[in-house]
Amino acid sequence: MKGNYFITSESVGNGHPDKVCDQISDAVLDAVLKDDPKGRVACETFISAGLVIVGGEITTTTYIDVHKLVRGVLNDIGYTSQIYGFDASTCAILNAINRQSPDIAQGVDAGGAGDQGIMYGYATDETKELMPLPITLAHAIVKRIEEVRKNKILDYLGPDCKSQVTVEYVDGQPKRIDTVVIAAQHTTKILDKTGEKITEAARRQIIKVVAMPIVEKLIDKNTKFYINQTGKFVVGGPQSDTGVTGRKIIVDTYGGIVPHGGGAFSGKDPTKVDRSAAYMARYITKNIVAAGLANKCLIQLSYVIGKAEPLSIFVDTFGTGKVSEQKLVELIRKNFDLTPAGIIKVLDLRKPVFRRTAAYGHFGNSAFRWEKTDVAAKLKKDAGV
């Protein structure tokens, strides 16, 4: 796009109720894969005031102590006291897990996709992670909140938090941060005499300690900061908002910069292509951009349940491609196995790595296999660029 425009992305912390559910669901998945790499998992979690419900369909040869696992995740996040409205040691937990439908299993067992759907992948050269800048900054802010909370740098912060960053672009390139929004749960320690809002000193401290290490180089005198804009955020977490697995799909991906296929990720084993094929789509686009074949690249894949090969492959480089989109589709077909079995093998998805994806985004973290750029040199050579 030419001219000036603004793009906003948000993220949520690991104590946000929806993200708590994502982490529990993926912890269940990891526990299954640890002892049963071919286990089938579709796990959903619901959390509300004093209650966690874990349900879904699981077929496995191992045993999962769901109650122990749930309390462990809640403790790791920091819900260890009623001061934050939820206590891992006293909350009620309901296990409502069943087996996978045999009608689905017969198609998956034969090597087909675990569901129909469309999946998107994206990469851009505007950050070193080859991720959009707004979502990268938003993730970094909520990660920083967890860091200062757990290290007692700001001992009044609670587990629940959200961030939002608006970036101004000029002719397609990010130039400055226009707005930073932070909503951070806290104790009554930083309330002013009215009890209706945090003190100005606390507001400035949150900007200085949380935001500035992340955004300082990209702000200017006109950058706006909104910190707990309602005044206070004492009542948070599951006490104030119900959480459900799979309800933060834009936070999980690219921050709304590009389309989303609609399928959530957490709690699903890799035979579910709405998760594994989305990872493969990211792997493909990141290697295309790393190869210098485009500055930005979007890919769409589509599947039907029970069939292994994708029904379609669509590529868009937004006018930045060094070769045509048709050529890129040919390179993709040549260099990437897009069957569920091929994706699982290439990305090594039978291992318990998924809980780490369940907070702060599934993309942009170099620890994940789908973030490697090990095909970039081959793509560049095959493209003749």
Image (cartoon, helix red, strand yellow):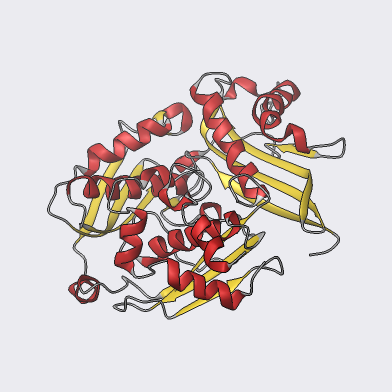
Please name the residue shown 58% across and 21% down the image. Answer: 154
Q: Where is residue 317 drawn, in percent x and y?
A: 65, 68
Left or right: where 50 falls relative to 324: left
The image shows a total of numbered marks equal to: 0
Please provide percent x and percent y for residue 344.
32, 60
Question: In the rendered view of the protein, which quadrant contains the N terminus?
Answer: bottom right
Q: Residue visible at 59% across and 38% down?
A: 140
Q: Quadrant of residue 20?
A: top left
Q: Which of the two residues, 56 or 331, is positioned nearer the viewer here?
A: 331
Viewer-side residue, 321 vs 24: 321
Compared with 32, 156 (above or below) is above
Residue 93 visible to the viewer = yes
Nearer the observer, 305 or 95? 305
**Residue at image point 39% right, 48% down:** 21
Image location of residue 245, percent across then percent down: 41, 54
Q: Is residue 47 above or below residue 228?
A: below
Taking 328 as reference, is 88 left or right? left
The x and y percentages for residue 52 are 33, 46
> Can residue 48 be seen by looking at this rendering?
no
What residue appears at the point 70 percent right and 23 percent down from the top-left corner?
Answer: 205
Q: Is residue 385 left or right of residue 19?
A: right
The residue closer to the viewer here, 294 or 299, is 294
Image quarter of the C terminus = bottom right
The furthest residue to the left: 61
